[in-house]
């Protein structure tokens, strides 16, 4: 099955209405922190409910006596979900003593039990529906899972939970075939629900209206989640479907072409999902989204897609010969820009690559488990220094004993991501101690530098493949936030005092007259100019600021000091970078000199503003103007004031 556009669709347009799930559940780690019905966060510190608030932050237990620890934010949410919790058998799953035999998250089994009940209510578990290997139009892929022991065990646990629900006990051998099929359908079709800071808080299965969108490693659409309210809430203007399902006739007839069934299942609440175009889509073109991390090279994407969804991707990016620029650069050895034909050399490179991968995985695992960001930073920076190119101007000679990481290798990008987070945590910990505020500033500076390098590297790849708009948006916002945290440091106290306590709404007077990009981006993230013009104009602006503030950011950092420019990677020998031309109204984002502290601060402020506003613009294209990231950007810019930056500004150049 697939979805195609019956008409031309421009970039940045919603192409489905909000789609409610067939079934959903919180991840195991979110059971104590989020409402099991609406997925909104709970706040147990508030002793009393706020009046006239439908989402009461005081946790309310499910009262099913199953020790599940399911919590709800209001009686309304508990009433909507608690019966499903019990009647699906999920309640009795928590009462079992041997669920430890299931090697993955219990959320997969809990979701499968809820989905089983949904299919029962819809009448989709009768033999005529099961014979095709699909349930409700969704593929189960039962025959493709080569780990039958795991599937059988999961089906056994599900079947036992449902028998306990019905007051039946005993051997379940031979009764779990349908449970296994539903479980495989969950493993094949479930999607992680991510909102607010990109953290996975739950999993959900949606009907064909969402699940029939196929994967591509160079997609033309993206999806976002919304936790706002229940279906049928007044005042919401929702678009209809702008795609047409195509494929197996019998499969489509199973849903009778019913748009309500394509849109929603039995749920009338839960996390909604919506599809949005990230490229211009031609009439008749297939609309695809990404199931895998697009910043992974081909070999990792293929492995991830097979492990999770049991298919081999044959999209244009994966079938490209030679590899696309992005895939070459994400996996290429910096010491060898040509294809290596020497077997011994190739084996040695593979071994070195595995060692670096193990080092990265070990550092991240220890960081997540022990909470020791300092050790993580030391381990990753040592790895980067020892394995990086020493000169940016000339490629290294091939050496069978070395695997050199360049700044755009996917292991480098993952390292920057982890380092930016680890340095930020260290800075926050140090800032709480007044005696360590200078140390906190230095740590914050390092975190901002890694965050900026990550954004610049991703932008370089995004310039070659616009499918990377989502990570580019996230990383530019993260870089802007890190820079904003740096310029608010007490180190600049005298400068901040002169700037009215660093209120952005009063910092940018006259700025609009000097940088039309900032002015236009600030006006709701919607520009009159074309998408490519905006991207080139942004690069033109920050290319003028970067050389003046980058030396300050990387001073004393052994690995980063060898990175001459976080925006220009043309020295790699494969240029895909946009021309840095000021195409948006004669930008004057210049005048920052490294030698003057006050001017460095102003340059960092300008850089932060560009990052946040451009990241917000990309986000509005990718997810729409009302997503949580846009709210986050506006909060960083306005601090909740809601006033326009261009209303009261002051020239900071």
Image (tube, helix red, strand yellow):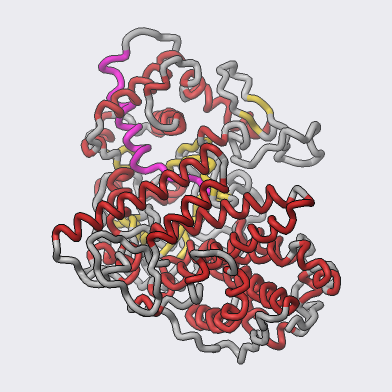
- Residue at image location 35% in from the left, 7% down from the top: 170
**Is residue 162 at least partly visible in the picture?**
no
Q: Is residue 597 magenta?
A: no
Tell which of 357 and 285 is nearer to you.
357
Q: Is residue 189 magenta?
A: yes
Asked which quadrant contains residue 6, the reply is bottom left
Task: Please report the bounds of the magenta region as a residue range.
Answer: 172-194
Asked which quadrant contains residue 110, the reply is top left
- Left or right of residue 225: residue 650: right
Quarter of the rendering occupied by the C terminus: bottom right
Tell which of 526 and 258 is nearer to you.
526
Relative image position of residue 414 (x, y in whole percent):
44, 56
- Left or right of residue 315: residue 443: right
- Residue at image location 34% in from the left, 37% down from the top: 185
Can you say whether 653 is above or below 300 in the image? below
- Left or right of residue 453: residue 468: left
State the count of labels: 0
Relative image position of residue 468 (x, y in whole percent):
43, 66
Can you say whether 532 is above or below 220 in the image? below
- Residue at image location 56% in from the left, 47% down from the top: 373
Asked which quadrant contains residue 553, the reply is bottom right
**Is residue 512 at least partly visible in the picture?**
yes
- Residue at image location 45% in from the left, 85% down from the top: 579
Tell which of 253 and 597 is nearer to you.
597
Tell which of 240 and 609 is nearer to you.
609
Relative image position of residue 541 (x, y in whole percent):
58, 82
């Amino acid at each position: 099955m697939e979805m195609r556009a019956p008409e031309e669709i421009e970039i940045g347009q919603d192409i489905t209405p909000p789609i409610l799930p067939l079934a959903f559940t919180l991840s195991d780690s979110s059971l104590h922190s989020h409402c099991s019905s609406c997925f909104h966060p709970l706040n147990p510190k508030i002793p009393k409910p706020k009046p006239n608030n439908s989402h009461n932050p005081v946790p309310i237990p499910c009262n099913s006596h199953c020790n599940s620890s399911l919590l709800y934010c209001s009686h309304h949410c508990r009433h909507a979900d608690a019966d499903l919790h019990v009647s699906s058998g999920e309640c009795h799953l928590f009462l079992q003593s041997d669920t430890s035999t299931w090697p993955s998250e219990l959320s997969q089994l809990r979701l499968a039990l809820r989905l089983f009940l949904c299919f029962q209510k819809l009448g989709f578990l009768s033999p005529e529906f099961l014979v095709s290997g699909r349930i409700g139009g969704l593929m189960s892929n039962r025959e493709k899972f080569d780990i039958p022991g795991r599937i059988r065990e999961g089906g056994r646990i599900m079947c036992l939970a449902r028998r306990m629900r019905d007051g039946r006990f005993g051997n379940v051998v031979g009764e779990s075939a349908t449970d296994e099929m539903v479980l495989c359908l969950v493993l094949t079709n479930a999607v992680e629900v991510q909102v607010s800071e990109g953290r996975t808080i739950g999993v959900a299965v949606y009907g064909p209206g969402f699940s029939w969108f196929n994967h591509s490693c160079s997609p033309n659409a993206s999806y976002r989640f919304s936790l706002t309210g229940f279906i049928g809430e007044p005042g919401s203007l929702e678009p209809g479907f702008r795609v047409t399902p195509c494929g197996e006739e019998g499969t489509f007839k199973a849903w009778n072409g019913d748009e309500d069934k394509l849109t929603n299942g039995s749920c009338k609440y839960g996390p909604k999902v919506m599809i949005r175009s990230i490229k211009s889509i031609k009439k008749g073109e297939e609309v695809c989204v990404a199931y895998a991390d697009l910043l992974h090279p081909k070999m990792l994407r293929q492995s991830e897609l097979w492990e999770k969804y049991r298919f081999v991707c044959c999209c244009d990016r994966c079938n490209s010969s030679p590899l696309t620029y992005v895939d070459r650069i994400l996996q290429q050895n910096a010491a060898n820009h040509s294809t290596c034909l020497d077997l011994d050399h190739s084996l040695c490179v593979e071994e070195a690559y595995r060692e670096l991968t193990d080092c990265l995985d070990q550092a991240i695992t220890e960081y997540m488990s022990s909470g020791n960001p300092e050790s993580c930073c030391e381990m990753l920076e040592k790895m980067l220094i020892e394995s990086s190119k020493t000169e940016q101007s000339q490629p290294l000679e091939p050496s069978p004993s070395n695997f050199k990481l360049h700044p755009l290798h996917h292991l480098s990008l993952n390292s920057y991501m982890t380092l930016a987070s680890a340095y930020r945590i260290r800075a926050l910990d140090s800032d709480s101690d007044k005696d360590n505020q200078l140390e906190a500033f230095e740590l914050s500076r390092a975190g901002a530098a890694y965050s900026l390098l990550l954004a610049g590297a991703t932008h370089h790849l995004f310039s070659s493949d616009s499918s990377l708009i989502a990570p580019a948006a996230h990383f530019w916002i993260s870089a802007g936030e890190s820079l904003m945290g740096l310029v608010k440091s007490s180190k600049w106290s005298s400068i901040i005092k002169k700037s009215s306590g660093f209120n952005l709404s009063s910092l940018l007077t006259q700025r609009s007259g000097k940088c039309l990009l900032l002015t236009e981006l600030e006006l709701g993230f919607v520009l009159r100019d074309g998408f490519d013009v905006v991207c080139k104009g942004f690069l033109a602006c920050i290319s003028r600021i970067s050389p003046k503030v980058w030396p300050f950011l990387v001073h004393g950092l052994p690995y980063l000091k060898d990175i001459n420019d976080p925006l220009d990677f043309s020295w790699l020998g494969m240029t895909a970078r946009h021309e840095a031309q000021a195409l948006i109204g004669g930008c004057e984002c210049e005048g920052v000199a490294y030698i003057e502290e006050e001017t460095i601060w102003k340059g960092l402020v300008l850089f932060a503003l560009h990052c946040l506003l451009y990241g917000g613009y990309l986000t509005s294209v990718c997810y729409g103007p009302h997503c949580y990231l846009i709210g986050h950007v506006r909060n960083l810019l306005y601090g909740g004031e809601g006033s326009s930056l261009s209303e009261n500004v002051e020239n900071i150049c």
